[in-house]
Image (cartoon, helix red, strand yellow):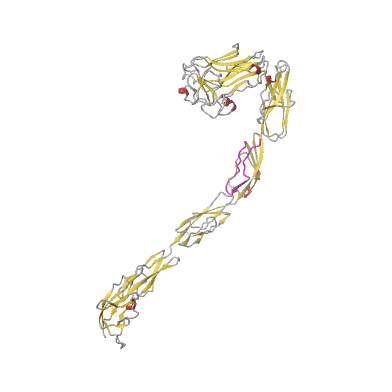
Amino acid sequence: MHRILYTVFLVGFMCAFAFRLKAQTCTGSLGAPVINETFGHGTVFDGGSPLPAGVTDLTYVYGPGCGGNDGTYAILQRMGSSCKGGTWQAVAKDHTGLVTGEDFGYMMVINATIDPSLFFTYKVDGSKLCPNTTYQFAAWIMNILRPLPQTQGYSRPNITFRIEKTDGTLVKQYETGDILESEEPTWVQYGTFFTSPSDGSDLVVKMINNGAGGNGNDLALDDITFSACGPLIQTGFTTIGNIDTKSTCQNDNLDYTLVAQQSGYDNPDYKWQQNLNDGNGWVDIPGAISLTVNVTLPNAAAGKYQYRIGILNKATIGAEQCRIYSDPLTVNVYPPPDVGVAANTSACEGQPVQLRASGAETYLWTGPNNYISAENSPVVTQTASLADEGVYTLRATKNNCPFFTSTTVKVFAAPSVQQISDAQVCQGDAVQLTATGNNITHYKWEPSTGLDHDDIANPMASPSVTTLYTVTVSNDGCSLQPTAQLTVKVLLKPVADAGKALRMFDGQTVKLSGIAAGGNISVHWTPSDYLDDANSLTPTCKSPVDITYTLHVVSGVSCGEATSTVFVRVYKVLAAVNSFSPNGDGINDNWFIKNADNYPKAEFNVYNRYGQLVYHSVGYSKPWDGNANGSRLPAGTYYYIVDFKDDYVPKQSGWVLLVR
């Protein structure tokens, strides 16, 4: 935002005058400004707030970045290169910012009216002016038009500075003449000086643009001041003119003699002030009322210390607000540099040792073996040895203020690891890996898949597939990280599958269907009875009885043996006699069925000629004796059905003759 600062520091008597760039400006010492219009600062790029009513006859416009049409003004931070079709200069910063180094300051950008116009006016309270005192009214102005020939035929700004009484009586008028274009955006101070009325009248200061608008006559305005101009005050440290800023260091004893001189006031009153830049502004130094003052400050704290002398002409004016002040003398007290240095520096034997520091302007390292370096981060050696160990001291300075620190260099023996022999393991089993070497404190195995630990020297490995393992070793002081590798070959364990159970009738043959897997295997069947080749996966079997065979798959690489069994069911042919005589003579008294005991789950059913069931048995452990429910059956032909309860064997039926 813009601001207009009112102050009452005014001075009397004469001012030395000079012409600078067509400006009439004070070459003596200025009082604090009654007007100090900087147009403020802010974070809004396209515009600050408009000026108060009555300050200008122009119309305020809000950005964007190039102002408005003829007869308008904008409060901007900067202007781009495309403003007004590229006929305006690209202005990067306002004048206040160029002086202070601060960003985000505003300036007043004026697009002039076609006719001459009053673009700045301000009323000054006469009670705040010192009578019969020389004042300077000045402003920093820039012709914002690009140089010829691009703006050929454009009119140029031409400004009139007027100081009047409120009744229109002219006190002073100053003409800038045409303000020329420049190759680069250039701020130029224009101004005039005058003597304030002796009767304390109010004054009105004005700036009028005399050029025609339309094409050209556009300008930027900043830092408008109205200040008293007094005699030149010269100061210095110990001697007049020794005004260069002094520098010292925190906790030093600040001790300076400040001197001043002036030739203009016959009966001067002196007063020294200090500004510690702590927010309290300028403060009188008690008892400092002569041209010389001694400033002491033991164990000075870091900061910026400024001193100035104020002079009042008591013979003619006497009012405190009419005191003028010298330019400040400055003492900078700097803290020691904030230097970053590691407390300990480690290196690998045979590798570079480098010290590191930052935050200072000069560096001086010293260390063992008469080591010395002025670099901030020097390499002590490319091949470290135990002789390079020790304390290295640093003297670092910034603003000529020293800081002392040190770092301890530790040289670690380089780690080494021996090559590891490959290993093999049976699938599902584990093998121990072992890394050996020297100066090792840390291990890292990769990949970690299949390991019980990946950060020890001897992990147990049980990978599911053949895997290449790499171990990286290190210690706490070395960046060197050697590696070793080995392959763990996974051997397949034997797998046996004897196949599904088989069936056949007595006198037939059947082929076994074994399956085997694994690495370097051999196979055989037990027992070998009734097999044509017990060492084949698919031998032919001709067993006359039920039998169970076991398939043995043996690993040839010591990964064990796998077994699987298969049952071969041999069915006997059922043979029933076709007659029997249950007469109790002990001969052929029961119905005999050969091989019936081979079918313990079979159902034996006998029917009479009427289809009535006369005998039923599961299994044939108790042969039929010709009775039914304890009663003798008559002689005759009976019919039977045998249900074997086996999907492999079909039902069998027939007849039998019961003889009495």
Q: Is residue 403 magenta?
A: no
Using residue 375 as the reference point, say whether residue 558 is left or right of it: left
Relative height, residue 201 to residue 340 (above, below): above
- Find the residue positioned furthest to the right: 287
Q: Is residue 334 above or below residue 225?
A: below
Quadrant including the C terminus = bottom left
Residue 539 appearing in the image: no
Residue extending farthest to the bottom is: 585
Q: Nearer the viewer, residue 229 or 645?
A: 645
Where residue 557 appears, x then y in whole percent? 44, 65
Please name whichever residue, 430 or 648, is drawn nearer the observer in this view of the structure.
Answer: 648
In front of the other: 660 or 487: 660
Q: Is residue 584 visible?
A: yes
Left or right, 276 with reference to 447: right
Query: Which corner quadrant of the image does residue 169 belong to?
Result: top right
The secondary structure that dominates the magenta segment is loop
- Residue at 60% x, 15% y is 204
- In the rendered image, the vertical position of residue 421 relative to residue 541, given as above or below: above
Q: Which residues are magenta?
A: 335-361
**Farthest residue, direction top:** 169
Measured as percent of width and height from the top left, residue 213 is found at: 48, 16
Name which quarter of the figure residue 129 lies in: top right
Residue 274 position within the rendered picture, expressed as x and y whole percent measured from the top left? 69, 27
**Residue 252, how many percent across, how many down?**
70, 34
**Count of residue discs:** 0
The N terminus is located in which quarter?
top right
Q: Is residue 357 magenta?
A: yes
